[in-house]
């Protein structure tokens, strides 16, 4: 049975050559890659300034700190109910108050819900293009101008996509990109790179001063080895990685260490440049795979739904909504036994509001399916068949228990 993996990064020989060149030239931390990346991104995004740093978190932190300096009397930041936890962590760490607003069917911030949350202490609205699906960013830009609040265009999960002739990430007062795993441009794990997208406004001088004072990130070669082990070789190393993490927690204790702000390392900048050159090719590959999934799951009467799918729309991840009655954890465990690697969606920060609207909590019913670059239509069909088989067996098992059958072996 073939192993169907998640697309943490689409890397090939070009990325390997970039790594070897940086190593052989002794340019892991410092080198020309950073300036070259700045120029390439400025041309792609058609903006005057891009400031590479060591992560999307650092970019968001510096941007929000600048907004706090400009309007110290405001301390509320509107965020979508469904968003990457890293965004919430940055907002909390700065002492700001996250104000949660509902999302729409496309998993993006709902403009009407956002408008209801704007008040006299609102500092900014963070609009994320969830899993690459474009939010109604033009509407939010008009809303922010009318209410005199800042707008953050969080394009961490999408690079090179546009709305109304403008690149995502270039709306509002500043934008953010990330180069961590599962993004459009991948240089490694969190800490491998991110970007502040800047305009000629009052924010830019503040963030430029912060970024120019940073030293390049350290430890990037070892981080690259860890990334390859934990992600690119995941199908071979998952079991060993799990045992190591368990041992590490018992010996030295668990808990993640905070990411220290730093500049982007030359190694990561060179990897980002290589990824940018193949961006259009990888985009076409993803569109092809998305189309295969839409076709395979679109049988008449099928209970499956891809909430963000639209023909021709790029998505960073293939997210599928499970049918009612299918428990996500049990489905994931069984699919793993059948050699299909899956991943849960982000947790929802206001599940009560989802229930109030009569819609399921997206964090409890969405599952990410494999979408690696060389995946074929046959591979997609194979994944969908296994998914449908597992879901059907799970619903039957649940039905039997409801009918009084206490034997849970069918769910194991």
Image: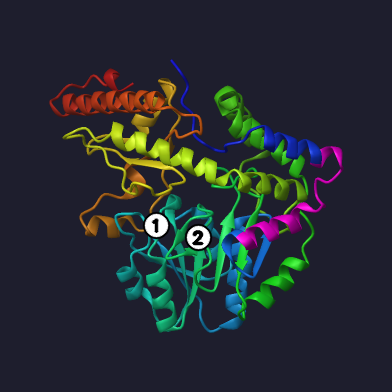
| Residue drawn at point x = 55 percent, y = 65 percent | 175
In which quadrant will I find the C terminus?
top left
Decide if residue 182 is in sight here. Answer: no
The region drawn magenta spans 22-43
In the displayed structure, would residue 379 be above or below residue 168? above
Disc 1 marks which residue? 349
Name the foreground residue: 93 vs 368: 368
Decide if residue 75 is in sight here. Answer: yes
Residue at the outermost left position: 403
The percent coordinates of residue 334 (x first, y second) are 37, 24
Assign a secondary structure to mark 1: loop
| Residue drawn at point x = 63 percent, y = 29 percent | 244
In the displayed structure, would residue 99 be above or below residue 15? below
Name the foreground residue: 200 vs 356: 200
Disc 2 marks which residue? 88
The percent coordinates of residue 115 (x first, y second) are 34, 74
- Magenta run includes residue 377: no
Q: Are marks 1 and 2 in contact (CB under 8 Å)?
A: yes
Total marks shown come to 2
Looking at the image, residue 270 sits to the left or right of residue 253; the answer is right
């Amino acid at each position: 049975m073939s192993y169907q993996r998640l697309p943490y990064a689409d890397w090939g020989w070009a990325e390997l050559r970039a790594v070897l060149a940086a190593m052989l030239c002794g340019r892991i931390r410092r080198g020309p890659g950073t300036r070259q990346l700045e120029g390439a991104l400025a041309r792609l995004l058609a903006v005057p300034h891009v400031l590479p740093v060591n992560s999307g978190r650092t970019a968001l932190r510096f941007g929000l700190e600048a907004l706090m300096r400009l309007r110290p009397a405001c301390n509320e930041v509107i965020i979508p109910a469904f968003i990457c936890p890293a965004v919430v962590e940055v907002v909390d760490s700065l002492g700001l108050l996250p104000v949660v607003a509902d999302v729409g069917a496309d998993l993006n911030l709902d403009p009407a819900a956002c408008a209801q949350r704007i008040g006299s202490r609102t500092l900014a609205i963070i609009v994320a293009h969830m899993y690459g699906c474009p939010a109604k960013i033009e509407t939010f830009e008009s809303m922010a101008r009318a209410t005199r609040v800042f707008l953050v265009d969080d394009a961490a999960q999408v690079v090179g996509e546009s709305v109304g002739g403008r690149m995502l990430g270039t709306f509002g007062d500043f934008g953010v990109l990330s180069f961590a795993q599962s993004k459009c441009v991948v240089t490694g794990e969190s800490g491998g790179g991110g970007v502040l997208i800047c305009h000629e406004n009052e924010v830019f001088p503040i963030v430029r001063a912060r970024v120019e004072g940073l030293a390049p990130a350290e430890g990037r070669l070892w981080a690259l080895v860890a990334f390859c082990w934990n992600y690119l070789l995941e199908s071979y190393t998952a079991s060993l990685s799990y045992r190591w993490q368990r041992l590490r927690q018992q010996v030295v204790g668990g808990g993640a260490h905070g990411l220290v702000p730093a500049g982007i390392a030359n190694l990561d900048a060179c990897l980002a440049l290589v990824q940018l050159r193949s961006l259009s090719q990888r985009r076409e590959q993803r569109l092809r795979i998305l189309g295969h999934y839409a076709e395979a799951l679109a049988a008449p009467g099928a209970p499956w739904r891809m909430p963000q799918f639209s023909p021709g729309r790029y998505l960073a991840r293939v997210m599928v909504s499970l049918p009612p009655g299918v428990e996500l954890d049990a489905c994931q465990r069984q699919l793993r036994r059948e050699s299909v690697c899956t991943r849960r969606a982000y947790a929802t920060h206001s599940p009560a509001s989802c229930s109030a609207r009569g819609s399921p909590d997206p964090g409890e019913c969405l599952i990410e399916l494999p979408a690696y670059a060389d995946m074929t239509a046959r591979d997609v069909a194979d994944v969908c068949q296994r998914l449908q088989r597992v879901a059907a067996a799970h619903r039957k098992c649940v039905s039997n228990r409801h009918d009084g059958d206490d034997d849970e072996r069918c769910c194991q």
